[in-house]
Amino acid sequence: MLSSTFVLASCGNENASTSEVQQSISLSQTSLTLEQYQSATLECKLNNISGAITWTSSDLEIATVNNGVVNAKNSGNCTITASIGSLKAECAITVVKLAQAPRLVMADTTISLDKDQTYSFDAYVLYKNEKIDSLLEFSLKEGEEDNIVSLSFANGKIIAKGLAYGETSYIVHTKALGINLSASLSVKVSNSSLSLSIDNIEMNEEGYRLNLAAYKVEDGYDTEFTPKVIFKENNQDATYPLTYTSSDENIAAWENGKIIAKKDGQATLKIECEEFAVKVEIHVQVYKGAYRVTLKNTKADGTDDVQMLAPGKMPANPVLEGRKFAGWYSLDGERVSEIIDDMTLVARWKTQIEGFVGDTIYTFDVDNNELYGTPEGVEKKWNARGMNEVKNDITQSWGYGAIYEDGSFVGLPNPNSFEGTVGVTFPAYDFSNSEPLTFSFGLSTGHDGNEAGKNSPFMVNGNSVGTDINTKMAYTAKIDGNNVSVYNKSEEKTYSFNLEDEVYHGQKGLNITCQNTQYRFFLCTPYKSLLVDYISKCESIEEEVPDSPINDADSIALVKEYQELRTLYTDTENSLYPMSEKMSNWIDALPKTVLRFEDNGRSLTTTGNLACSDSWINKAYTQNGLGRNVPFSLGEGYLIAGTDDLTKTYGSVTLPAFDFSAYKNVTFSFGQGGNGGGTKARYFLGSVDNATSYEDSLNLPNYLGEATSTNTIGWNLAEDIKATISNGKITFKGNESTIDKTLDLDNDIYTGQKGLTLTLSNVTWEFFVLSPFTASNI
């Protein structure tokens, strides 16, 4: 058993010599946390007393104790007591669940060996990437043949010895850290000098597979097949007798070396040399001679077509004027690639969707049928300037490739400083006969050309849904009947309205427009059903993530997915399936924005030539909007300060007081933006008020380092430095810059009694930018 020893000692007398010394008993620890099945030893100290020590546990289900050795059993709390007479000492024990379960690892789970041959392979128990000493034992599986092989375990290896020809299976099992572990081991003992194969059937990972038909039709499968058997001993033809058997002769049977199809179904046909346990298996699928296939959505008049098709075949692609065939699908929406039974197929098509800039209309293909907008039916295209290619003035350096997500279709960008309308009109879609659905839409990036960095207003069929305020794909629409709700992520607000009758009944298309955009793409995801099994998905996520929040990227991603799926729950579903305490704790622990500079810092205290003024803030948005290879987009909630001249002076800003101690960690980013190619901006934590000279300030303990701007006009370092505050310390880490420093944070600042101060120097005509605070408890 794996154990951790916290204190190794024995009980003993402290050599008390007089009765004047007070008698006492104490333990080396008053509290202790253990994982399940972990052990620790408590030291007992006696003062002026002797005698036998009695050890007890308040809950033997949680932890036991024997001569001071504590063994953790199950999660929970208990008290370990050491006593002599009326004197006693206690240790509070907390037992937590195993952070991860041990697992049984075997180098092989299927082995083949000759009679009298010995074969060994590694096998061990692994816990937290360390091997645990465990004794492995073996049990014959029920119904399996005994005396085929002998198995033993020694020195971390399983040793197998072939006893007789045949096949069998065992369960390998052990107990580690109180958990029963097991794995299956399959053993085949055969004559390796013999080989048996089929020469005229292609073999794949699943073995030999053969398709036949119960009766022959044109272009269909054959009704019989003669395998070409190759049986060798040391590369010479073998003469040992072979037996031919079928798992179900009513489906497929052997007749004079041929496989004969009887009726549709599956059977396994075997050729075997029983004397030496050598065999091959052929997995046979027998189909009907032909299947009745009903084809829907293939004719302009809406009527169905019926065809008789051979197994594995597909109908010819249909043709409809003005549409492009997109594929065959089942009634459940699954793509179909071969016919394996009587079935109904639904044809999907692509149609034209209109995107417009001003008075010019462009078109491109999207899916248009009762399963409109599924990823399989949507073409991804570069629709720059209304064409399916990237023009020379829009290159990959703009980073636009990332915005084309699977299944999304893309609208059209506007000319620079365009003041008209941009948008799309979707193909007519009958929402009255549709299940509830959802889709997201918006612009490719945030926008900075309007007042306070806000985007132009969006309209859905003439109904306002607010502005997106620098948020990509800012809107999520849900349509249930003729009721529409559009959630604006930027505003954290929901807009509700009813579809007009013509749109609701599919007589004209849904229309989305916005105004006054600059160099932006309109995006819209496919329609997705709201009747997906999001409840089961949430339940599976809850089972998969740990019981308590931990800093694990995969778990955090799952919880974020869970959080998004919960938004699909109706009020009734929320009452039937309330969020568990476990998931509520996870969501509470996720990183979240806890402090935004709603006025971009205008109200904050600044010193020197550093100012969060209207003129500087407006200038920052305008300059950042020029978009010269800028990977950074200013958003609402950022602090923005301008600097006139800090070449040999300092400028400081004091942030709002914030209780960092309320979270495990709080992060924010900051840096310089705008002009200043080659400038080396220097940063300090706190103010600079005790330096005898400017050069002397670089030796101050609160000097963080410098970050060099490489762009003549750019914002490449605007969020370069990441600050992380945790456990009373603040760590600064640069990305492009070399800043890497950890300092103790003043306790008044850490506990929110006063605000954090940052100081900037050695820049000319720059912007100082600081992001909102993000906090988490993991």
Image: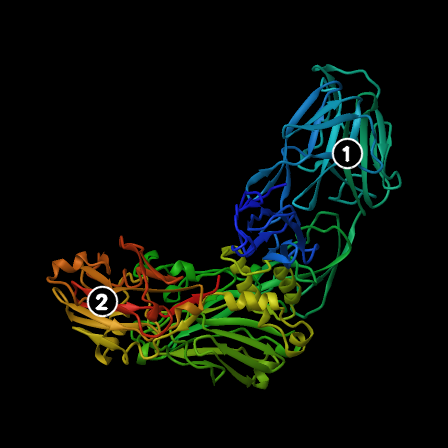
- Structural crowding at the residue carrying mark 2, measured as other residues with C-alpha within 10 Å and reported as few (<14), some (14–19) or many (≥20): many
Q: Which mark is residue 169?
A: 1
Q: Quadrant of residue 629?
A: bottom left
Pick whichever, 522 or 429, lies toward us: 522
Q: Is residue 590 left or right of residue 281?
A: left
Spatial CA span between label 2 and label 1 = 71 Å
**Which quarter of the figure is the N terminus placed in?**
top right
Pick whichever, 83 or 242, lies toward us: 83
Disc 1 residue type (three-letter): Ser
The residue drawn where x is 19% and y is 60% is 712
Pick whichever, 772 or 20, lies toward us: 20
From the top left corner, tell me how far across and down residue 202 is, in percent. Answer: 68, 33
Regarding residue 607, the answer to whether it shows in the image is: yes
Residue 295 in the image: above or below residue 509: above
The residue drawn where x is 52% and y is 69% is 588
Regarding residue 368, the answer to whether it shows in the image is: no
Secondary element at image label 2: strand
Q: Quadrant of residue 226?
A: top right
The residue drawn where x is 44% and y is 63% is 664
Q: Which residue is mark 2?
A: 759
From the top left corner, tell me how far across and down residue 82 is, in percent. Answer: 62, 53
Pick whichever, 725 or 52, lies toward us: 52
Secondary element at image label 1: strand
Q: Which mark is residue 352?
A: none
Q: Which one is closest to the eye, mark 2 or mark 1?
A: 2
From the top left corner, tell me how far across and down residue 247 is, in percent. Answer: 85, 37
Disc 2 residue type (three-letter): Thr
Q: How is the image coloured?
A: rainbow
From the top left corner, tell me how far across and down residue 84 is, in percent. Answer: 64, 53
